[in-house]
Amino acid sequence: MKLFKKNACICLAALLLFSFSGCAPASPSSAPGQDAAPQGPVRIATKPMTEQYILGEMLSLIIEHETGYQTEITKGVGGGTNNIHPAMESGQFDLYPEYTSSGWVMVLGHDAKGVGDDEMLQKLKEEYQSQFNMTWVGLYGFNNTFTVAVRGDVAREYGLKTCSDLAEAAGSLVFGGNPDYIEREDGFPALCAAYGLSFKSVSDIDIGLKYQALASGDIDVTNAFTTDAQLGVADVTTLEDDLGLQVNYFCSTVVREDALSKYPGLEDALMKMDGLLTDKEMAALNYKVEAEGQDERDVAREFLISKGLLES
């Protein structure tokens, strides 16, 4: 009798547990308005440069904090925009940090000269949506535009201060630049045309290796960016753009429209990056990674904490 009662109690407890399991709260991994969490992580791509590594980590940390979705970062995709954009089209990645004039010129094939910043961003959104089913979300705040950097001893030898000064010396110098810059119409070709430059030779150099190539003497001149950490510590001279050639490169997030549908709340999370960084702040973060050897995810997390976007 006791055995029967004991077994009956066990069965009753199991029945009650099974009955109430259907009333249990939704899993924390399920986003509001969803029956289940999306399958797979949000896939982020970055170009092969310190700045992009830091931005990729910021995007990852913000997305994970704001939405609970997992993220997966593919760091340093060789060729930058040239290879990331096709991979975005094929669905290999969901989003990546991109610069306005890069998308305008390299992807859409437009001339950036004379186009206002607001007009460019609006048309970028329209044409990316109609052509690629993608959009641009927010502007991070900083403008990472091009400048020309010359090895210090070369600049002193030839008395180089402006890009116009470079014309006379270029025939004796080696230019090394990243493929994005060398191939884009508003990059190296425009620089050479505007200032009448004809270099001794031109080499393709990955973005992250340009300053090493300068220091070793493999190249004499390169395209630099105004937020480069090395500009404050390396023996290089940046030349004045005395003809006003360069246009603006504001950073934003390019994201597939289907990713925004698949991951509710993703767009709101990405907007946390809007207006987050100044040129000076971005350069300082780059310096922490490149000069001080700090981990880019730690640098990104520390910065987001300082802005109140993450808890310490």
Image: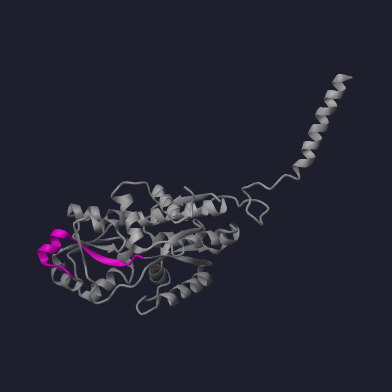
x and y percentages locating residue 39 in the rendered image: 60, 50
Q: Which quadrant holds residue 239? A: bottom left
Residue 161 at x, y percent in the picture: 17, 69
- Left of 139 or right of it: where is 238? left
Q: Which residues are magenta?
A: 143-161
Residue 149 falls inside the magenta stretch:
yes
Spot the residue most to the left.
157
Give percent across and percent down for residue 170: 16, 68
> Quick one: which residue is furthest to the bottom in this view?
114
Color style of the picture? one colour
Q: Residue at x 55, y 64 (%)?
A: 257
In the image, what residue occupies the spot 54% across and 49% down?
70
Rendered position, 305 above or below 161: above
| Residue lying furthest right | 1
270 above or below 70?
A: below
Examine the structure image and report whether residue 33 is included in the region drawn in magenta.
no
Left or right: 93 with respect to 146? right
**Which image quadrant: the N terminus?**
top right
- In the image, 197 versus 63, the foreground residue is 63
